[in-house]
């Protein structure tokens, strides 16, 4: 029985299997990050559009809204802007009159969310590498410890 050669082959086999699994995980995570980036870019594009800027100006002028049921005054930012042009159906605002969400005419709602961090792309690239080295190193370490028990004493 050749323990050294068997351990080496097992480490390589599990390392390659881990790299393949890391590749699948990398692909899956990349799709999520790309979707998040696309969602962020679409929101930024809509928020910077002329339609939204014009609605913001209207809100800042101080149009007063009243609750139809109670008759109480509602702050301008609490009342969503029903636009109906430029592909935008409605805009919701925060207290500082920044765009909180935009509902498009096709039924999608875009929320303010941060762009994916640059380190995520590096982490995604590391998945297959880590997928190889973690099982490879674990098998090598276990083989090294096990070999210590089977060496003939001198």
Image (cartoon, helix red, strand yellow):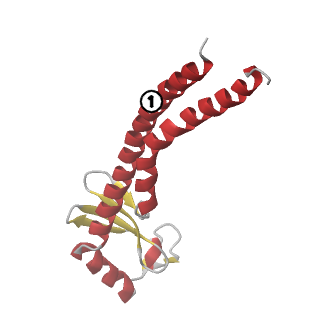
Mark 1 lies on residue: 16
Residue 60 shows up from this direction: yes
Judging from the image, what secondary structure is the residue with disc 1 in? helix
Location of residue 22 in the rendering, given as x and y in whole percent from the top left corner: 45, 37
Identity of the residue drawn at 34% across and 80% down: 56
Furthest toward the top, the residue is 1
Identity of the residue drawn at 35% across and 61% down: 40
Residue 1, above or below 75 = above
Comparing 116 with 21, the one in front is 21
Furthest toward the left, the residue is 86
Identity of the residue drawn at 58% across and 36% down: 137
Image position of 69 (left or right of 137): left
Location of residue 123 in the rendering, given as x and y in whole percent from the top left corner: 46, 52
Comparing 68 with 104, the one in front is 104
Residue 106, above or below 96 = above
Residue 24, above or below 8 = below
Image position of 130 (left or right of 51): right
Location of residue 117 in the rendering, given as x and y in whole percent from the top left corner: 44, 62
Residue 117 shows up from this direction: no
User: What is the crowding at mark 1: few (fewer than 14 residues within 10 Å), some, or many (at least 20)?
Assistant: some
Comparing 91 with 113, the one in front is 113
């Amino acid at each position: 029985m050749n323990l050294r050669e068997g351990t080496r082959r097992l480490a390589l086999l599990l390392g390659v299997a881990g790299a393949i699994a890391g590749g699948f995980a990398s692909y899956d995570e990349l799709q999520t990050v790309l979707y998040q980036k696309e969602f962020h870019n679409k929101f930024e594009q809509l928020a910077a559009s002329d339609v939204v800027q014009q609605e913001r100006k209207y809100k800042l002028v101080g149009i007063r809204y009243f609750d139809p049921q109670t008759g109480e005054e509602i702050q301008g930012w609490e009342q969503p802007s029903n636009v109906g042009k430029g592909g935008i159906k409605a805009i919701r605002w925060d207290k500082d009159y920044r765009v909180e969400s935009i509902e498009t005419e096709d039924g999608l709602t875009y929320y303010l969310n941060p762009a994916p961090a640059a380190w995520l792309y590096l982490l995604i690239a590391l998945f297959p590498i880590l997928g190889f080295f973690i099982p490879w190193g674990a098998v090598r370490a276990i083989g090294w410890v096990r070999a210590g028990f089977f060496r003939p004493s001198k």
